[in-house]
Amino acid sequence: MLPEARRRSILSHLSRVSSDTIIDLSQRYHVSTMTIRRDLRSLERGGYVTMTHGGAIFDGDAYQQIESHQIERATIRAAEKRAIGRYVATNFVGDDDVVFLDSGTTVRAIVPYLKAKSNLTTASNSMRTIQALFRILPQSAILCTGGTLAAAAQSYVGPVAERFFDDFFARKAIISGVGYSIPAGLADSQLLDTAVKKAMIRSAERSIVVIDSSKIGHTAMVQVLATSEIHTLVTDDGISPGMRQDIEAAGIDLHVVPVKHGEQARVI
C-alpha cells in the first residue's frame, strides 16, 4: 500500500475507533512502527490526529474546524470565483457533455452558468454542488457518489466515493485545491477529499484546474496533481506577471479571467 493510501486508511480507521496504538496500527497495516510514526506525524501536521505516548487520538474538533472552512470559503473572493465559474461554463462545458465536479467552492461557482446547457450529465461528491445543480438543471442527469459524509463540508469521501468513479467516464473533471505552486503542483489540505479528486481525474478524458489567484504560490499537505500533469489552469487576473510567465513556461494552458467587482453574490 502506498503511503498516501495507508494514511487515508489510518485516518478513516481512527475516525471510527477514536484512538489506537502504534503497535496495533503497525500490525494492522503490516509495516514497521517507525513507518506508522511517520504516518501519524504527517496526519498530526494536518490537524487530523493528536499523537500520544505510544499511539494517536483522532482530533475531531480540529477536523471539524478544518472542514468548516468550506463554508467560509464560499464567500471569500466571491467575484473572482464567479468570473472563473462563468468563464469555465462558457468555454469548457458544452451541450451533451459529461462532467465531474469536485467539492470546492470555486468549482461550485460554475453551476449557475450551466443553465443554458442541454443534455448535460454531471457527477459530484459534494451535497451542496448536487443541490445547486438540481436547482439550476432539474431535468438533467445528476449523479452523486455516496460514501462517508464529512458533515461540516457536506461532501462524500472514503472508498465508496472513490470507487464510484471507476464505473463512469467523463469528458472533463473540474478540480480545485487550496494552493498551487510550480514545485508542489495543485495541493489540498483534505487527505480524504483529495483521494476522491484523484479518482475523478483518473476517469476523465481531460482535467481542468480552477483556482483563484490568492492561492497561487501557496501549497498544502497533499498533492492533487503535479505541475507536469496539469494541462489547463483557469485563474483570475490577480495573478502576478512573474507567476503567469512561470506557469506558461511549464507548458500549462493558462487562462486568466478578468474580474468584474461589485456584482451581487449569488448564493448556491
Image (cartoon, rainbow, N blue to C red):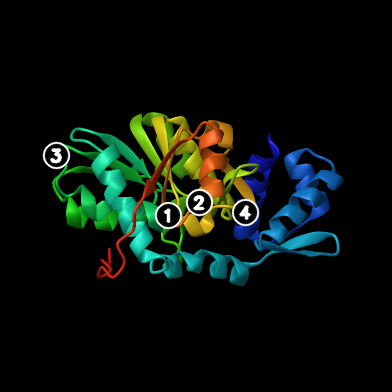
Going from the N terminus, do you reach mark 3 or mark 2 first? Answer: 3
Residue under circle 1?
Answer: 104
Measured from the top left, where is residue 3 in percent x and y?
70, 40
Going from the N terminus, do you reach mark 1 or mark 4 first? Answer: 1
Dot 2 surroundings within 10 Å: few (below 14), some, or many (20 or more)? Answer: many
Look at the numbered disc 1 and give the secondary structure of its residue: loop
Residue under circle 3?
Answer: 118
Going from the N terminus, do you reach mark 1 or mark 3 first? Answer: 1
Kindly check if marks 1 and 4 are in contact, taking CB atoms under 8 A apart as contact: no
Horizontal placement of 96 versus 51: left or right?
left
Dot 4 surroundings within 10 Å: few (below 14), some, or many (20 or more)? Answer: some
Give the residue type that dot 1 points to. Gly
Kindly check if marks 2 and 4 are in contact, taking CB atoms under 8 A apart as contact: yes
Q: Which mark is residue 177?
A: 2
Going from the N terminus, do you reach mark 2 or mark 4 first? Answer: 2
Look at the numbered disc 2 and give the secondary structure of its residue: loop
Dot 3 surroundings within 10 Å: few (below 14), some, or many (20 or more)? Answer: some
